[in-house]
Structure formats: structure tokens, C-alpha cells
Image (tube, coloured by chain):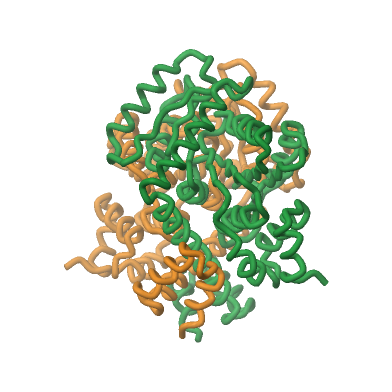
Chain colours: A orange, B green
Amino acid sequence: METAATLLQPLLEGRPRAVARAISWMENGHPGARELMALVWPHLGRATVVGITGSPGAGKSTLTDQLARTLLAEGKKVGILAVDPTSPFSGGAILGDRIRMGRIATEPGIFIRSMATRGALGGLARATQDAIDLLDGAGWDVVIVETVGVGQDEVDVVSCVQTCCVVLVPGMGDEIQAIKAGIMEVADIFVINKADRDGVEKVEQEIEGMKALSCVRDWDPPAMRTVAGDGTGVGELLGKIREHGAWLKAHGGFEAKARERARLRFRSLLAEESARAAMERAGTGRVAGLIQAIADRTLDPYAAVAEVLAIR
Amino acid sequence: METAATLLQPLLEGRPRAVARAISWMENGHPGARELMALVWPHLGRATVVGITGSPGAGKSTLTDQLARTLLAEGKKVGILAVDPTSPFSGGAILGDRIRMGRIATEPGIFIRSMATRGALGGLARATQDAIDLLDGAGWDVVIVETVGVGQDEVDVVSCVQTCCVVLVPGMGDEIQAIKAGIMEVADIFVINKADRDGVEKVEQEIEGMKALSCVRDWDPPAMRTVAGDGTGVGELLGKIREHGAWLKAHGGFEAKARERARLRFRSLLAEESARAAMERAGTGRVAGLIQAIADRTLDPYAAVAEVLAIR
């Protein structure tokens, strides 16, 4: 039987199947998952982690693929994690994988994975962080985390990568503006994709306006123009991502991001594990009874949870 | 000083300021929050709860306002909860509120609130459920929960309302399709908004195609056409929402939705409260030390969480 110890070696050698298996272990709560993470942990810290977020339809996947191709041409190994919060329902992740398969070839050095929450306790952010670490430990040079930037989990994930790119497109409406305001603080670089369309200057002005409303930061997030479809501006974007990395290194930003990421990992994992432990102590029958009592309105949820937490 | 007992009376009388204060109590974890919910709990179960979800730019807010206006004209009290997952960052909720203020007048009988997660432990779904219950207890006839349908929390929230409307628009791209696949299972009614645009038939065909891929359900979600901007189709949509409510009543669907909602409430609250309890037992100094050790890579997050959970 495969154990954490036997999976470790092929993982550290960078075998894609071992990486895929290890990610599945973490996603599914395999009995060896914790030991595996403990074994991989000392090997981390080399990968560059880039976040790509933005609205649906902004061209994030195409941009991600173009960045990956450019890095691949430099001889880099690139991991792509597509955070897909819709997946617990029918077809989300599967559909996503199928779309990707047509877009980027299964070239050596490229590792693609759609992340999905299957558990009930919101393990998406946690599982994605685990996958980043596993790719890092397995020797991938760059990990790109691509996500629709609107859910809390997704914002959490991209908020503590090394460089977070927020992708916008010309000609979107008011609601997009609201989203832009929300992810303003996590953006290290704004990418105006589909920049061959009308309205690029308007988006640039809006970004400036948003920046004026937001707190002043040491790093002033620039706005880059790209046309991901034909690769225009992708090299320049990569250059800016590296410039931001160098800036972080020079200004203690790596340590701050690492602490932020550690805090997120600790908190999301604690929420998941402490709830699991509490449910185990209570037992499934009692939990089911409490849920039924809430549904029947004979017990309020706060009282039900207090009852479970009182079990020692 | 205001207590749960003194806030209860104006709340049950439907005073908007009491509702607003009670929601803030639940959001901020006010000391009286649990007692208040326990006191309100026996008064619940009368409100109709409708979810409006879909992609950014689909016109959800305009549609929500039109539904609210129509219900208001019938003499109904309507609560609107705008779930805004971007709000922990700058301006999200504030911007959202400002936009709304211009859109729907502060008419008596209308209660509008942007929901925001401020806590670190993902309390958005929980706080929104609390707000639904408080509006229900305060005598609001209909509560409309409006959210961008892509984050896990948001999908959780709309998945257990009485009737979930998924809003689509003609002429959107592939990524929208993926989202549609994801929320397929939670849709009770599809709304094709901006139906005066080209491509309505194409969206209708895509919905049919998606339905063919998904599991068969007893209620076959219909596709309704609206133009929220001028109110076209809004009355018909409201009729369909009521038809779905009647269908649920006749087929035991209310009980199933109530159980699903109770399960979500219990689990999200348990995750939040059990993590809080564990952190209190450990103490802030020790938690900070563990987070620093994770950041320094001397301890992996699973081991750190196990250490905290071992404290009794």
C-alpha cells in the first residue's frame, strides 16, 4: 500500500502522477495526508506563486496559458491551479478540465489541475494552498493560481500569493466596477486584457480613480495592457511580475506575504479540523438530530452548536 | 444598555432600525447575538425567501429592484440582502450601498442591506442566514437574497432559499457557460435578462443542453425572459416564483429545503465557533507563535492545528 513515505520520493523527483495523487490525498483527507505534508514541508519555498483573478469572461484562462507558454519556452516548469468554486455541482470541474485540455497541450513541465471543493466545510482555500505547496516541493518553478475573483475563498487564496494580477477588460459595466473596488487591495498588477478593444483609456482612468480611493501602499500597482489571444503584452507582464518579485525581496515583502499566507492556512485549516473534531465527538446520530431540530424550529442554530461544543 | 430582550420588541414590531441593529449584532458577534437569535427563533417561518444569482453584469440588482417594486405595489414588505463578498476590502459594501440608494428609494416596506464578511473565519454565509431570519421574524413578507453566483459561500446561501433564480444574459462567453454548469443544480428558475438583445434563443438552447447533462429533478426549472430595465416579464417571473412555491408545498419541498438550510447553518456556524473556541483555549500569543512557525517553515499547518486542537 502507498504511504506518505513511499509517495514522498516520486513527489520530490517531480513526477506528475505523484503530484496529482498527493493533491488528491489532501483534497480527500486521505489518512496519510498530514504526514505527507509534514514530510514535504522542509522542501518548500522555492516556487514563485502568481495569482490571476478577475471577472468571468475577462480572459484569465487564455492569459494564464500564454504566461505558461512563455515560461515553458524559458525552460521553466509551470503548475496551473484553476480554482473552480462551482465544482461541487454538476460538471463544473470536469467541464473546466475539458476546456483546458483543448487549450494547452499536455506538454512536459506543465501541470494543470482544477481545484474543487468536495467537502462540506469549505476546504477550497485550504486544498488550493496544499496544492501550491506540493507543486513547490515537487520542484515546479512557477505556480499560477487562476480564479474568478469574487468569492471570499478565492480572494483569500490570491491575496497571499507572491504577485496577484487582477484582470479587467474594456467595456464592462457598473457591477464590474464594484468587484474592482473589492479586489483593489489585493492587486499587485492590473492587467487590462483584450486591450485591442475600445475603452482601454476609460479602464485605465477607472483604475486610477479606484487607487485614489484606496489606502496608499508602498508598491503602486501598475496597469499593463495585454491581448492574451495573440500574446501581445504577455512578455511585458511577465517582466512586471518579476519586477514586483524583486521589489518584494528588497522591501521585506516576502516575509509579510508568508505570514499572511500562514495565518490564512492556519485559520482555514483550524475551522475545518475543529468542526470535524466536534462532529466526531458528537457522533453522526446526534448531529443529525440537532440539524432536524433546527429545521423543525425547536432549536436555534447557535444553541445547537453550543450543545456540540460543550461535549468534551 | 440595549439587551437582546429590549431589542426583541421593536424587532418583532418590524422597526427597520431595530432590524438593522440586530443584523449588525449578528455580523459583529455582539454579546447579545445568540440570545437574540434564540428569542426570535420561535417567530420564524412566514417569509418567502427568493435567491437571485448569476454572473456580474447580468442585471441582478435591477431585476431585484423590479421584483421589489412589484411586491411593494401589492402591499408586501420586501427585504433585500445584497451579498457582497468583496467587501472586506476597500469600499465594496459602501460602493454597493451607494449604487443601490440611487436605484431604489428608501420607501417604507423596503429594507436593503449589503452583507459583508468582516470576520476572518468566513462568516458571510452565516451572517446572511441570520439576516434572513431576522427579517422573517420582523414580519417581512419576502426576502430577496441577491449575490454573484460564483463563490462557494454565495452558492451555499442561494442553494437553500425557497426559490433560486439564476440570471443569464444573451451573448456571454465560454466562462459564463462553466458557471452556468456549476449553478445548474441550484436553479429553480432560469431568468434570461436583457432578453431584447440578440441571442436569446441561443441561451435557451444552452439551458436545455445543460439540463440534459444534469440529473433529472422533479421540478423542471423553466427559462423566463425579462428586460429588467423596463420591467418586461417581471410580473410573469413573480408568477413563476409563486408557482414554484406552491409546487414545493405540494411535494414536501419546503421540508427538504428547511433541512438543507439547517444543515448549512449548523455546519458554517460550527466551523466558525469551534475555531473561535480552539483559539481562545490556545490564547493569542500561542496562536501568533504557531502562525510565525508556519511562516518560518519550522512547522507545517496541519501539525500546528493538531497542536491547538490537543489543548483541552
B38 to B310, vertically: above or below:
above
Question: x, y percentage for residue B68?
Answer: 64, 35
The residue located at (42%, 75%) in the rendering is A277
Residue nearer the viewer, A235 or A164: A164
B82 to A201, vertically: above or below:
below
B34 to A171, vertically: above or below:
below
Q: Is residue B106 left or right of residue A261?
A: right
Residue at the extreme top of the image, as rendered: B198
Report the number of numbered marks: 0
Q: Quadrant of residue B138?
A: bottom right
Q: Is residue B208 visible?
A: yes
Q: Is residue A288 left or right of residue B68?
A: left
Q: Is residue A241 left or right of residue A174?
A: left
Q: Is residue A223 visible?
A: no
Quarter that holds the N terminus of chain A:
bottom left
Residue nearer the viewer, A182 or A109: A182
Residue at the extreme right of the image, as rendered: B1
The residue located at (37%, 66%) in the rendering is A37
The residue located at (73%, 41%) in the rendering is B97
Residue nearer the viewer, A45 or B253: B253
Question: x, y percentage for residue B32?
Answer: 70, 71
Q: Is residue A110 left or right of residue A174?
A: left
The residue located at (46%, 45%) in the rendering is A145
Question: x, y percentage for residue B50?
Answer: 54, 42
Residue nearer the viewer, B245 or A44: B245
Question: x, y percentage for residue A310?
Answer: 51, 82
B302 to A121, vertically: above or below:
below
